[in-house]
């Protein structure tokens, strides 16, 4: 069997960067069942409604949808079950302190295979208000227009 190398993206949560201000990111392993891993290798995962919680000193990923494995039988998994995240104790204690202080949340940004192991990129994030989202959209639009104008000037138009 050939060992996997590098990072192979499974799913990403593109709306998370729009709805939240990302303060810090963490990488966590995911405790999975066999059929879940096979389904992830087929790319059948969705992070849309997913979030992480810390209960009794353990980090849990909730709302992650991993579709049932097509060739699975009675051993198949429940698509939206809670999955345990694997992190160092020091990181978990650090997160508990930060979440308790402010109104912060843990949001998964992406899920990927790193050297054959399933990982989740978690973000410590603060929710954005509607006016913050509008400002970000206006800033992106202005940067896009500036880049277009520079491109036109370089081409001599």
Image: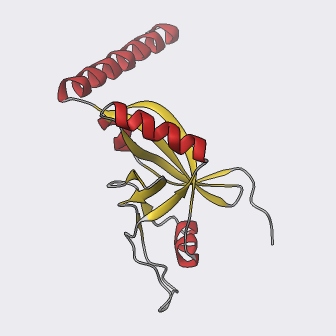
Q: Is residue 113 above or below residue 38?
A: above
Determine the residue located farthest toward the front in the rendered image.
56
Query: Left or right: 27 with respect to 104?
Result: right
Residue under the image location 51 percent in, 86 percent down: 72
Q: Quadrant of the N terminus?
A: bottom right
Labels in figure, total: 0
**Quadrant including the C terminus:** top left
Regarding residue 17, the answer to whether it shows in the image is no
Q: Please, which residue is most extreme toward the bottom here? A: 74
Q: Is residue 76 above or below residue 140?
A: below
Q: Position of residue 82 (x, y in %)?
A: 41, 66
Q: Quadrant of residue 18?
A: top left
- Residue 15, quarter of picture: top left
Residue at the limit of the structure toward the left, as seen here: 130
* Residue at horizontal 53 percent and vertical 67 percent from the top: 40
Q: Is residue 28 visible?
A: yes
**Where residue 69 appears, x then y in whole percent?**
49, 79
Question: In the drawing, does residue 105 fall left or right of residue 23?
Answer: left
Residue 48 in the image, given as x and y percentages of width and height: 34, 54
In front of the other: 25 or 5: 25
- In the rendered structure, the answer to whether residue 139 lies left or right of residue 96 reads left
Q: Position of residue 100 (x, y in %)?
A: 36, 37
Q: Residue at x 19, y 23 (%)?
A: 131
Which residue lies at the image location 38% right of the left edge and 20% below the top edge? 144
């Amino acid at each position: 069997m050939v060992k996997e190398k590098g990072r192979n993206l499974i799913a990403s949560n593109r709306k998370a960067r729009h709805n939240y201000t990302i303060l810090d990111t963490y990488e966590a392993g995911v405790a999975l069942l066999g059929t879940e891993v096979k389904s992830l290798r087929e790319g059948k995962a969705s992070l849309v409604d997913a979030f992480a919680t810390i209960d009794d000193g353990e980090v849990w990923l909730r709302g992650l949808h991993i579709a049932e494995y097509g060739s699975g039988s009675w051993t198949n998994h429940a698509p939206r079950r809670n999955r345990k995240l694997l992190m160092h104790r020091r990181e978990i204690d650090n997160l508990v302190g930060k979440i308790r202080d402010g109104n912060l949340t843990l949001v998964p940004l992406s899920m990927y295979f790193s050297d054959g192991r399933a990982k989740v990129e978690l973000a410590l994030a603060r929710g954005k208000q509607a006016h913050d989202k509008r400002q970000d959209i206006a800033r992106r639009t202005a940067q896009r227009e500036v880049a277009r104008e520079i491109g036109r000037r370089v081409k001599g138009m």
